Image: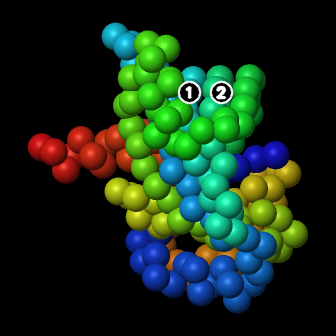
């Protein structure tokens, strides 16, 4: 599976364009908290450790997730992914992870719509600190290119190769300068 993330110059038109071509499967709210060992800063693009609170239909679940990532041609393949559901609330999970010697490095929330469109998965997300983005999942790069051409004809967009935590971290750094 190949994933690609897009950011739009005029995000107001994007959601209506997506809804005209597809249907919403579910709506969700997510909060991600990323950690790194104290005195180290992991590269989000290669390795990440986070807590994720995912709320769908009013039901919140908290997961502890570790990933080692390999990137190529605007797609990603996970070498290692470990995901464990926690019985705790997000803030309790944060305290547990900190007690293991990790520190919180970036936190953000996003509101999303999971859509089925043109035979594949699409995620429209309004991400705290960076705004709306769209993630498209398809089996081949050609299928992604076709979906972009059909769904976003006439809209200005950029393909975003960086991960969301990297973008949020940069956005927060720029705001504090």
Q: CA distance from mark 2 to mark 1?
A: 7 Å
Say what secondary structure mark 2 lies in: strand
- Colour setting: rainbow
Q: Which residue is mark 2?
A: 67
* Residue at the left extreme of this rendering: 177
Q: Residues within 10 Å of mark 2 (few under 14, many from 20)?
A: some
Answer whether residue 61 is visible to the viewer in this image: yes
Q: Earlier in the sequence, mark 2 or mark 1?
A: 1
Q: Which residue is mark 1?
A: 49
Answer whether residue 148 is visible to the viewer in this image: no
Q: Nearer the viewer, residue 143 or 34?
A: 34
Q: Nearer the viewer, residue 160 or 176?
A: 176
Q: Quarter of the image holding residue 74?
A: top right
The x and y percentages for residue 153 are 62, 80
* Labels 2 & 1 near each other (Cβ < 8 A): yes
The x and y percentages for residue 158 are 49, 60
> What residue do we see at 66% from left, 80% from top?
18
> What residue do we see at 60% from left, 38% from top?
88
- For the image, the number of numbered tags is 2
Say what secondary structure mark 1 lies in: strand
> What residue do we see at 38% from left, 47% from top?
168
Q: Is residue 149 above or below residue 38?
A: below
Q: Is residue 46 above or below residue 24?
A: above
Q: Is residue 111 above or below residue 32?
A: below
């Amino acid at each position: 599976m190949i994933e690609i993330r897009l950011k739009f110059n005029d995000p107001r038109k994007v959601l209506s364009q997506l809804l005209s071509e597809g249907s919403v499967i579910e709506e969700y709210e997510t909060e991600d908290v990323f950690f790194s060992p104290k005195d180290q800063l992991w590269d989000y693009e290669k390795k990440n450790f986070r807590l994720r609170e995912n709320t769908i239909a009013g039901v919140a679940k908290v997961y502890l997730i570790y990933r080692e990532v390999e990137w190529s041609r605007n797609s990603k393949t996970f070498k290692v992914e470990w995901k464990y559901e926690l019985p705790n609330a997000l803030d309790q999970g944060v305290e547990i992870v900190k007690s293991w010697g990790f520190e919180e490095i970036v936190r953000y929330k996003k509101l999303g719509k999971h859509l089925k469109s043109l035979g594949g998965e699409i995620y429209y997300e309004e991400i705290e600190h960076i705004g709306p983005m769209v993630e498209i999942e398809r089996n081949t790069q050609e299928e992604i290119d076709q979906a972009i051409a059909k769904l976003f004809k006439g809209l200005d967009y950029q393909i975003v190769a960086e991960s969301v935590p990297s973008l949020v971290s940069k956005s927060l750094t720029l705001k504090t300068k």
